[in-house]
Image (cartoon, grey):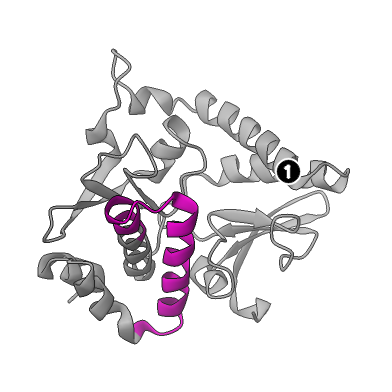
Amino acid sequence: MNPTNVYVKKIGKRGEINIWLVDGAEVRKHDNEFTNFGEHYGFSFIPEFEFWLDKETVPNERTFFIDHLLVEWDLCRKGVEFDKALEMGDAKEEVERVKAGDLKKVYDRRGQVELKHLHKKHMGNTTNSVYVWVIDGRLVRSGLFIDFVHGGHGYVYEFVPKVEVWLDDDLVYEELPFVLIHELHERNLMKDKNWNYAKAHESASKLEWKLRHNRKGVIKELQKLECSRELVGQLLNL
């Protein structure tokens, strides 16, 4: 990976740490496990004194991500194992999300999830009746699962209806096809072949990686996954 291709804009500094917006799509060509943000101890290709935040379509979570990274990075430098530091970073982030009042937007007075507040745009359906939605990623992370990133389906997340696939509204438009293919492929393996998540995710990640490096196969794969013409058109701006 050529680092000069990923930097978008320096947005801040915390002590000796420079905070950068980066082109996440470009980073994911190198490592498609990079999600909303990262630091050196989670991703060794990030310089030690830099935080990377993916350029968001909806840039309303940066303070949460930075708070998380400050805790995670500091603990790792002190010798704490990464998984424990990640857990503590999540805890700090959750506290800040509660303070922001996001939970009130996710649940009704009876404590039920308000899907209408999470759904943002219906992209279309597959021909076997899977409904594809762009959702409010911030609210999902604040109220349902802090580590929800890019997309998901009901065979992994119990809060996603079984007949739906969700795509994070933070994704830039050009990445939607890759993530949808990942989620549908993974979902099919778990639903139809009874694969466990780890095995299905590995297969989906390999397919996603291949397509990110060769876009020519995207339409064929969407058709193979039974995406309707309407859905393909929405995804590819046809």
Residue drawn at the location 42% of the way across and 25% of the way down: 103
Q: Residue 25: within the magenta?
A: no
User: Which of the two residues, 114 or 132, is positioned nearer the viewer here?
Assistant: 132
Question: Percent position (x, y) of residue 143?
Answer: 43, 30
Q: Farthest residue toward the top?
A: 110
* Quadrant housing residue 6: bottom right
Q: In which quarter of the image is the C terminus?
A: bottom left
Question: Percent position (x, y) of residue 195?
Answer: 39, 54
Q: Which secondary structure dominates the residues rendered in magenta?
A: helix
Question: Percent position (x, y) of residue 224?
Answer: 22, 73
Residue 137 versus residue 209 in the image, above or below: above
Reading the image, the residue beneath label 1 is: 72
Q: How dense is the environment of label 1, judged by Cα within 10 Å: few (below 14), some, or many (20 and up)?
A: many
Q: Farthest residue toward the right?
A: 78
Q: Residue 207: within the magenta?
A: yes
Q: Give the range drawn in magenta.
A: 186-215
Q: Relative to 18, is 192 on the left or the right?
A: left
Residue drawn at the location 46% of the way across and 82% of the way down: 213
Residue drawn at the location 52% of the way across and 43% of the way down: 147
* Quadrant housing residue 185: bottom left
Q: Relative to 166, is 213 on the left or the right?
A: right
Residue drawn at the location 17% of the way across and 66% of the way down: 226
